[in-house]
Amino acid sequence: MTRGKLKGAEIVVEELKNEGVEVAFGIPGGVLLDLYDVLYKDEAIRHILMRHEQCAAHAADGYARVSGRPGVCIATSGPGATNLVTGLANANMDSSPVVALTGQVPTAAIGSNAFQEASTFTITMPITKHNFLVTRTEDLPKVIHNAFYIANTGRKGVVLVDLPKDVLATKVDVDLHPKETFTGYKPKIKPNPVQIKKTVEVLANAERPLILAGGGVISANATEELRHLAEFLGAPVVTTLMGKGAIPENHPFSLGMAGMHGRIYANRAIGECDALLAVGTRFSDRLTGWQLDQFAPEATLIHVDIDAAEINKNLQVDIPLVGDAKLALQDIIKWLEKKKTTSPGSVWVQRIREMHSACEECIGDVRREGASISDMLIKEINGILDDDVIVTTEVGQCQMFAAHYYITKKPRTFISSGGLGAMGFGFPAAIGAKVAAPDRKVVDIAGDGSFLMTCHDLATCVENDIQVVVCIFDNRYLGMVRQWQELFFDKKYSHTGLGITPDFVKLAEAFGCYGERVEKPEDLKDALHNAFESGKPAVIDMIVGKEDKVLPMIPPGGGITRMIGAERCKPI
Amino acid sequence: MQAHIISLLVEDHPGVLTRMSGMFTMRGINITSLTVSPCEKKGLSRMTVAIDGSESELEKVRKQLSNLIEVVKIVDLKEDKAVIRDLCLMKVHVKDSNARSEVMQLAEAYRAKIANATLDSIIVELTEEPKTIDRFVDLMKHFGVKQLFRTGVTAIGMDTGGGLER
Ligand SMILES: Cc1ncc(C[n+]2csc(CCOP(=O)(O)OP(=O)(O)O)c2C)c(N)n1
Ligand SMILES: [Mg+2]
């Protein structure tokens, strides 16, 4: 389709619209004036002005994780682009589809150390799935189309497009909306039938099958298939942090998150199973622990992943199955149903049910003996938030308390920084989540340290009427690091005390938000109610035990079945 | 440990070499050589990467390479099914006429060319399989190698693999 001469910036916006983009999070700058001029005139794309580019990237990431569609962020050259870096690395590590547009100095000035020049292209190469430096306006349609295609297919990820000022300003005659893609980019989607048969053979004959669900299950929208397979097979489901929400955690076959801060029964099931079907996970060290011989030692390992490079990367497996998780699970179910009748009464199923109820009992018992205030708060939250609420998290103890105790019931409702573990993620991700799902409640489970890294974007929330609620675990510590110092470094709290943190209630009010302090877990319910009723973005400052610990945990160097601090868990 | 040669067809885009070498660095893969050159088709370049490593390391490299968007084709070339060459330019010290004639004889035995000669040195040029060059360089060390330049391996498969032909 030709439209006569168009400016580069107009081409970009036309192509964004054609890709279905409705929202972009960004901050303008000198080299982006042409682009922002088009955004001013064309209202098809809602632009949300952020207060820091890192937040723009996290917001785009949060938007993508909740909506399942690519999120878009925009930053100017130099400092704008370098500020984006953490956010992009984070999204890419967690395979979240994000397209970043950055301004660049004019092509003729590239390499001259011009004002606000940084080599965004080389800086972002290792933290993106792919990136482009556009040098000719004519190339824009193809580049923008491919940016979205690459970000949102195969193993999803971040694509950055660097746009020099002159490329945006030049007018050319071009055909819009090309279909052309790269010859070398053909993501493998369809699983190999031979591998499917092998998988089915193993699963049909397993006595103690277990399913390990990673973020890939959610990203492939394969949660229905996963649940069906679990029920048919009589297999419990454990998840990674990224996989939280792949199965409702109140389902009798769900054992919750496994790994370093996982539930003891989830880890135990990994130790006991004789067949492990891992779907859409990369076996990160936070899942496996460091003693790989303790990880599913008795099991035949089956690994389903869309990225062939993940097979045998961290863990040697018996049956690799490369392809889309949804298609693979559908094929497995189809063949399994021909081979096997369902076995809901087996000894293993009985055991799973026992483990599941032991977990439920512990989590349901808010005032359980030995529980810390932090424990109690998350347990309390379980009783307050309905199934549709989207929970994001910061990084640290707050995150692991949430991952461990929060009962996630739906996919795309637990949004956390998994691979990068970036403090400051949860709040801007909540902004993106709320923009993607304006009718749903969004709560950021935050740490005081993390929140201070990105709290300035409260201004964005107020300005754009984005009502998110931040619940701060206020322990006046970089708690997770402090916990390690307590347990493994003789309580030498080197630079983990936050000293005099700001009065978070006043901070909220200064931005025009609602603020409330909660001293006792039982007061949280009213506070959350007040926050939602206030109609404003809100901050709840929850005072927790300064030295609360997230337990049980796998100690450094340890294996998955040897957790410390597990005394509180009922032996089964 | 084994030497592996991977032949790649890549889109001829600016930055593709940085992307390749960055990937190797990022994944902690040690490469012995990397060459880039034009190929039979416009818009594509050929890269030849030599790595030392086990079969499983080779497998990892292949997979990471195929994840790069601009990589169009990957072939790992087996020694017995490929013509493999390296070009070596070397300045050898010759302390007297005896040394000079020995160097020249050895060069002839290896079918190396004499590219230049001065009173106290000879520049020899040898295009051969890397192992042969290794042996020749070792011999020359006996006389004193003042400067050594090697282009790194390039290789072509004897069957259809690696090219665009069908
Ligand atoms: C950007 C960043 N810097 C440093 C770290 C290392 N780190 C991991 S957890 C943590 C403490 C987080 O403190 P806070 O947000 O208060 O959460 P808490 O653990 O106290 O609940 C730190 C410093 C990190 N993950 N991210
Ligand atoms: Mg803290």
Image (cartoon, helix red, strand yellow):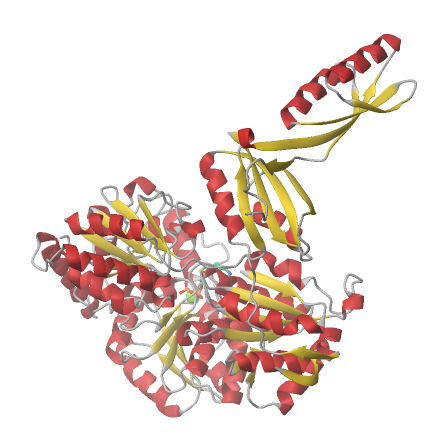
Q: Can I make out residue A233 in this image?
A: no
In the rendered image, the residue lying farthest to the right is: B119
Q: Is residue A420 above or below residue A11?
A: above
Front-most of B76 and A158?
B76
Residue A534 picture location, percent across and down = 39, 91
A126 to the left or right of A232: right
Q: Residue at x 26, y 66 (%)?
A: A225
B100 to the left or right of B54: right
Residue B158 picture location, percent across and down = 57, 35
A35 to the left or right of B98: left
In the rendered image, the residue lying farthest to the front is: B166
Q: Is residue B88 above or below residue A228?
A: above
In the rendered image, the residue lying farthest to the top is: B98
How many numbered markers are drawn? 0
Q: Is residue A355 above or below residue A108?
A: above
Tell me the quadrant of ligand 2. Answer: bottom left
Residue A466 picture location, percent across and down = 46, 86
Q: Residue at x 54, y 84 (%)?
A: A459
Q: Can I make out residue A459 in this image?
A: yes
Front-most of A249 and A448?
A249
Q: Is residue A439 above or below residue B164?
A: below
Residue A315 picture location, percent across and down = 37, 45
Residue A551, image quadrant: bottom left
